[in-house]
Image (tube, rainbow, N blue to C red):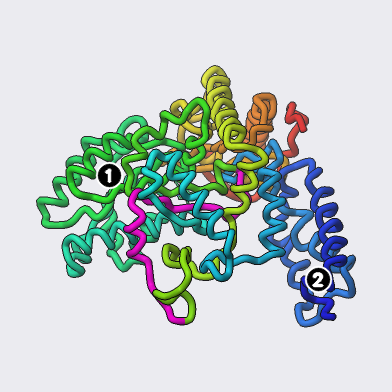
Amino acid sequence: MNPHLLTHDTADDYVAGMSRVTRLVARHLAADAPSTGATVADLAPAVESVDLDRPAADLDAAFAEVTDVYLRDAIWFHHPSYVAHLNCPVALPAVLAEGIIAAVNTSVDTWDQSAGGTLVEQRLVRWTAGRIGFDESLADGVFTSGGTQSNLQGLLLARGEAERRAGADVAPRLRVLATEHSHFSVIKSARIMGLHPSAVIPVPTDATGGMSLEALRRELEGVRERGEVAMAVVATAGTTDLGVIDPIPGIADLATEHGAWLHVDAAYGGGLLVSLRRRHLLDGIERADSVTVDFHKTFFQPVSSSAIIVRDGATLGHVTHHADYLNPRTAVTPNQVDKSLQTTRRFDALKLWMTLRITGADAVGGMFDEVIDRAHQVWEVLVEDERFEVATEPVLSTVLLRYRPAGLSAHDADSLNPRIRHALLDGGDVMVAGTTIEGRSWLKFTLLNPQTSLEHLSGILETIAATGEQLIAEDAMDEVAVASLGSDTSSRGLGADALAPRRPVRATGAGVAR
Ligand SMILES: *Cc1c(COP(=O)(O)O)cnc(C)c1O
């Protein structure tokens, strides 16, 4: 028997090993902060000192090592004080599914490697299509590694359709229209597809941060007048930075009028498909030609799990190739590889399947509704708190704020807020994101954890304020010191060494409940 491979012979080792590893992870779930604040310099020596040419002495040694190089200092998205990026705590049934996926190791590319896996994925694609409002008998799609790949595929299909209609030599004249808040994978996709970066035309936004329909009309007319071809309009349903939803129905009207493919990037807003109270925010999505949904964001799925869903399954033919060794025309079908940019591909669909079968779609939608509620609540708190500025009311679960107490200029707030964020990251107790909008620095809460209560968020606000206050006090002391040295009499504003590492400000027990 071979002790290294998972087979019937090693089934007992498998059971024992899995139960040990789940206990190891379970212990770390008790982490009292989302991060230890470990730096590259802290962790690199442990990683570098491992001799990869010789295995560890035993399982204990290997577990200890993986704890050192990774687990102890991992970033924990389930911790209520993690409110930084679009990362979710994961649905427990989906993690159980990961156990099955890894052990069985299905590849869903062809029927003869996957059998029921193929049907499960197809059923989920149809289910998602139904939620979108597509005709399930026409619609199709495929799971992907993420929104980036889903967007690439959506645009590839759009190009395929444009070329089918206008001929292959249309390529240099193809244009994609999207706002500057669209995900950067739109521009990356254009580059991968060999389009010039200028082929992506930025459509101005209006006061809501969503695509301006007037501007879209103007840009589409410009495209037509210049003899270019509007290959696709990308509407974002939940921008990564602000959670803004472009006005899909109006965009659909204009895309139809100009014969452009409508791709709706609902990587973030896709969770609204199962929302009990906010499904209407996606109204018009059923008019899309293709839709990106990231289950690993707002369906609480472990990375990776995403899909591209298309209104007309026949358009997936633009990515179909037949290879004699894999999926010849005579092969038993269905073969998901015929619709995918990937070949060997994880059976990620099983995670969503088990989540729907155990947690249920309504509960998933309820969790997304809850974090959106929380975003509205903390926004209301911020409006009343004079120490903070807050951006416009959230649509989804993203809240932009900046610490700016009375007397601090907007310019100084621009340099102070990134420093607050870095001080928090150094400490590890609280993780918030940051962004820049029209030259102004903001801190950002991206809420995807229903367990992050309003009390947690109030505690985080106190920690931000205390950190900001301390940085201002330190700067004032630096100024006094510099002045007394007489070496520099010019005022050292807060802008100086904006991102210089500072001693982390420990959360001052400021009510961050755990
Ligand atoms: C996250 C995101 C993407 C990219 O998805 P990945 O899964 O990270 O590849 C694309 N579009 C939007 C709007 C997103 O928020």
**Highlighted range, magenta:** 300-324
Mark 1: secondary structure: strand
Residue 33 on image: x %, y %? 75, 42
Q: Which residue is mark 1?
A: 203
Q: CA distance from mark 1 to mark 2?
A: 58 Å
Whether 224 is drawn above or below 45: the answer is above
For residue 236, the mark is none
Residue 486 on image: x %, y %? 60, 44
Quarter assignment of residue 211 = top left
Looking at the rendered structure, the kind of residue marked 1 is Val
Q: Nearer the viewer, residue 279 or 83?
A: 279
Q: Residues within 10 Å of mark 1 (few under 14, many from 20)?
A: many
Q: Is residue 304 magenta?
A: yes
Looking at the rendered structure, the kind of residue marked 2 is His
Mark 2: secondary structure: helix
Q: Nearer the viewer, residue 485 or 449?
A: 449
Residue 503 on image: x %, y %? 71, 45
Q: Is residue 421 magenta?
A: no
Q: Which residue is mark 2?
A: 8
Whether 236 is drawn above or below 47: the answer is above
On the question of residue 420 being in view, the answer is no
Q: Is residue 64 left or right of residue 510?
A: right
Q: Nearer the viewer, residue 21 or 444?
A: 21
Location of the C terminus (image quadrant): top right
Q: Residues within 10 Å of mark 2 (few under 14, many from 20)?
A: few
